[in-house]
Image (cartoon, helix red, strand yellow):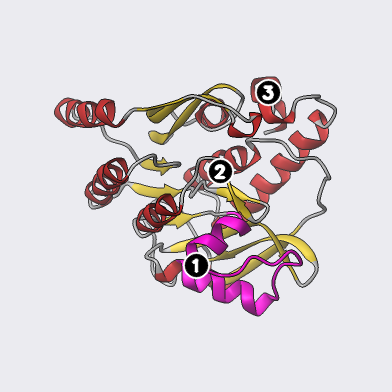
Amino acid sequence: MKQILLINDVVGYSHVGMVAMLPILTYLGHPTYNLPTALVSNTLDYGCFNVMETTEYMQGTLPVWQKLGFRFDAVCTGLMFSEEQARLVADYCGKIQESGTTVFVDPIMGDAGRLYNGITNRQVDLMRDMVGKADLTFPNYTEACYLTETPYKEDGMTWEEACLMLDNIVRLGSKSAIITSARVDGHSCVVGRRSSAPVSGFSQDLSEGLYFRLDYEEIPVAFHGTGDIFSAVLIGHLMNGETLKESTFTAMTVVSRLIDRNRDLPDKCRGIPIEQCLDLL
């Protein structure tokens, strides 16, 4: 049982972000807490939205937690809304990392070759800084392209290009990396790079080398929040002792099952009602 902190935005109208991750991690046996970076009315693809940034609240909360002696075994960061906020979170992660806390960074920025509505190039720069604090980061292919300043290609990458992109993410400072929603040599897959050095908090199994690739059959349905579900299942299984590759495969399998069960839901922007699907975890 590991204490996990999520630092991400809270979306009011949708099963995405923390709303999706909290029940998964709790179901997997980990007490899970939250520090919201913003309150967001709804997912951004509805066309209009309202955002209230919570930097001041974060600045007041972290000293209180420190005074009370609250400690976490792992922290997962998501979307940052300002330079001040990103620096605050990066500094906090750096400090707690020294005491053995595992830092996961989900660089939420875009998909399908473009940034999400409201995400700026400055936020991409800030996310590169956050990735530099990570024990593990897991961008999708679009986000990996923005992080590494690599042109996005509709037909994806070769295996050699995928390994190079993973290397470039590690050069930003992350100890290990996964790229989701990738297309490599014509196949939909998730690719990963283990750390060549020990990583605090989870197992890697270097017997198969630094790199791995896991292919999957793509389901032609696009739900919001599937990346958050992937992240939560991945982290939950890593913190339960599974290796990086094993946890990645488990997360892929769970996401596939959830999409398949809910494919007929009319409003995909609301995400998957995860509380109704915990039996698939």
Q: Residue at x 62, y 35 (%)?
A: 225
- State whether residue 15 is above or below residue 128: above
Label 3, label 1: how far apart the Cα atoms are: 33 Å
Residue tagged 3: 273
Please tell me which residue is depicted at 82% across the width and 53% down the height of the picture: 217
Residue behind mark 2: 231
Instruction: Locate residue 269 relative to residue 37 in the image: left or right.
Output: right
* SS label for mark 2: helix
Q: Which mark is residue 148?
A: 1
* Mark 2 to mark 1 CA distance (whole Å): 21 Å
Q: Earlier in the sequence, mark 2 or mark 1?
A: 1
The image shows residue 268 at horizontal and vertical percentages of 74, 30
> Picture coordinates of residue 84 (x, y %)?
26, 42
Prevailing secondary structure of the magenta residues: helix
**Image coordinates for residue 116, horizontal then vertical, percent:** 57, 44
Q: Find residue 13 and report its horizontal and vertical position in percent.
A: 59, 20
Q: Can I make out residue 32 in this image?
A: no
Query: What stretch of residues is rendered in magenta?
Result: 140-169
Q: Quadrant of residue 228?
A: top right
Residue 218 on the magenta span: no
The first of marks 2 and 3 along the sequence is: 2
Q: Nearer the viewer, residue 242 or 126?
A: 126
Q: Amino acid at mark 1?
A: Thr
